[in-house]
Image: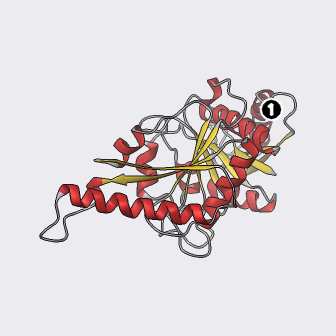
Amino acid sequence: MKLLVGYLATSGGADAVALAVRLARTLGAEVDICMVLPPTRAQPDLAFSAGYQDVLAEQAKQWLAEALALVPDGVRTTTHLMFDDAVAERLAAEAVRLEADAIVVGGAGGGLAGGYSLGSVVNDLLHSSPVPVAVAPRGTRHSDVERVRSVTCAIGTRAGARLLLDTAVRISQAAGTPLRLVSLVALDQHAIRRTDDTAESIRAEALDHATATLEAAKSVLPASFPVTSTVVDGPTVEAAVDKLEWHDGDLIMVGSSRLAQRRRIFLGSTAAKMLRVLQIPIVVVPRDDASIDGD
């Protein structure tokens, strides 16, 4: 396995390296720390200097050396530098070229509140990447957890998402932990449709549907594979997520929105709301060939 870290010399970049190390230890993967810098990012007095890119390259090599120093012994790691104005697009292309299993990035960059504040590059990857994207919340670098502790797979209300389930099973097996399937029911998304609808009947119908979807998901898992499942409801997605118990070292996996192109990521509205309250890493998996489980 190979993990490609989209690195910047920031606290978010250090969080990404820390998450990549945790995943690499769990999965037995190699890590490639990649820095893509826009060639036009220059100081005014150097912008038109013929040697500016050389100067920037030397600085970037120092940044990459600092990133490499964050990786403990025992995790095979390489680094490389590229220049491109389309940073997210270049990272995605590099992941394909290297046959990376996932791109790992830091979630502290500006945008959403809470443990994640997505910058433009991460946001672009979460709406276009052809491989899974693992996002480290702010502060991951301070954790002393060495391996993934548990894996939660968020199942939506639509059948499908086989690629999501297969990926979750793979990580759960490597982590040596049961897979937790979760369906989040946000009651604010269920409107009254019939004259005899009540708040309680709407809730019961939504919970029944979520339970049936979870059972359908469990039915495609390997025989005897250890799995637990739960349906959690709340007035909003955020409230439902807050009802779940989380620990340092946990990982949550979600599928892409139905708006995603085939074999591409597109962060859905439910996952985006989850990012507002989650303090654990999230992995977004591309849409598979058939039906998907996003929103």
Seen as rendered, the residue at the extreme bottom is 290
Is any part of residue 85 visible from this angle? Answer: no
The residue at the point 64 percent across, 64 percent down is 163
Residue at the (53%, 69%) spot, across then down: 292
Tell me the amino acid under the disc marked 1: Leu
Q: Position of residue 189 (x, y in %)?
A: 29, 58
Residue at the image point whose x is 64% and y is 49% from the top: 40
Q: For the residue labelled by badge 1, is the local secondary structure a helix, a strand or a loop?
A: helix
Q: Which residue is mark 1?
A: 68
Task: Kindly identify the residue that appears in the image at 75 percent across and 36 percent down.
Answer: 21
Give above or below for 229 relative to 46: below
Q: In this orientation, does residue 60 appear?
A: yes
Horizontal side of 259 relative to 162 (left or right) equals left
Q: Position of residue 181 (x, y in %)?
A: 54, 52
Seen in the picture, residue 236 relative to 75 is either above or below; the reply is below
Query: Neighbour class for label 1 at 10 Å: few (<14), some, many (≥20)?
Result: some
Residue 179 percent coordinates (x, y) = 62, 48
Residue nearer the viewer, 2 or 163: 163
Q: Is residue 202 left or right of residue 262?
A: left
